[in-house]
Amino acid sequence: MNATLLKFGYPQSLIKEHDQWCILLRPQQVTLGSLVLAAKSEATAFADLPRAAFAELATVIPEIESSLQRFNAYAKINYLMLMMVDPHVHMHVIPRYPNRKIFDEVEFIDSGWPGPPDLKSAPELTDKLRKNLLWTLQLRLSGES
């Protein structure tokens, strides 16, 4: 696995793994359900990914979006491919909400709504909350609920 995957907590943060991509729980929940979609490749430029990675996105993206809708219906979804600090190809997947959301009695506010997401705004996650969120999203992506 590449260094970017490891930086985002792989394998402990893994929600679902595909042949070319890993879906990870984003350590900072900018909004409830924020993810990282990270390529397994060593590529550091989007265009350098293998063709199979692009083909697999046709399955992975709809899976993410339908799973996040079942988890907590979002109004919009943003994919941010910044790759400034972490060099390997990855996207921050940020579901967007006009209203506050509650998960395990913790409030999540999309403080950037309706503009760009505020990446510095995120509640502190306890280990218990992180595990519950990870488990819940794993269930949604497996199609069990």
Image (cartoon, rainbow, N blue to C red):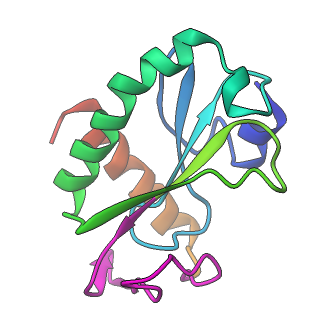
Where's the N terminus, which quadrant? top right
Q: Position of residue 78 (x, y in %)?
A: 43, 60
Q: Residue at x 70, y 36 (%)?
A: 89
Q: Residue at x 81, y 49 (%)?
A: 86
The prevailing secondary structure element of the residues shown in magenta is: loop
Taking the image as shown, residue 3 lies to the left or right of residue 49, namely right
Q: Residue at x 49, y 65 (%)?
A: 128
Q: Position of residue 68 (x, y in %)?
A: 28, 52
Total count of labels: 0
- Say which quarter of the image contains residue 122: bottom right
Where's the C terminus, which quadrant? top left
Instruction: In this rendered view, identify the residue nearer to me: 133 or 59.
Output: 59
Instruction: In this rendered view, identify the residue nearer to me: 137 or 86.
Output: 86
Q: Is residue 95 above or below residue 25?
A: below
Q: Is residue 57 above or below residue 103?
A: above
- Say which quarter of the image contains residue 118: bottom right
Taking the image as shown, residue 9 lies to the left or right of residue 3, namely left
Q: Position of residue 16 (x, y in %)?
A: 45, 31
Q: Position of residue 74 (x, y in %)?
A: 24, 66
Taking the image as shown, residue 99 lies to the left or right of residue 16, namely left
Which segment is the magenta one? Answer: 94-123
Does the stretch in magenta take in 43? no
Q: Is residue 122 above or below residue 65?
A: below
Farthest residue, direction front: 47
Q: Residue at x 58, y 84 (%)?
A: 121
Q: Is residue 102 above or below residue 93?
A: below
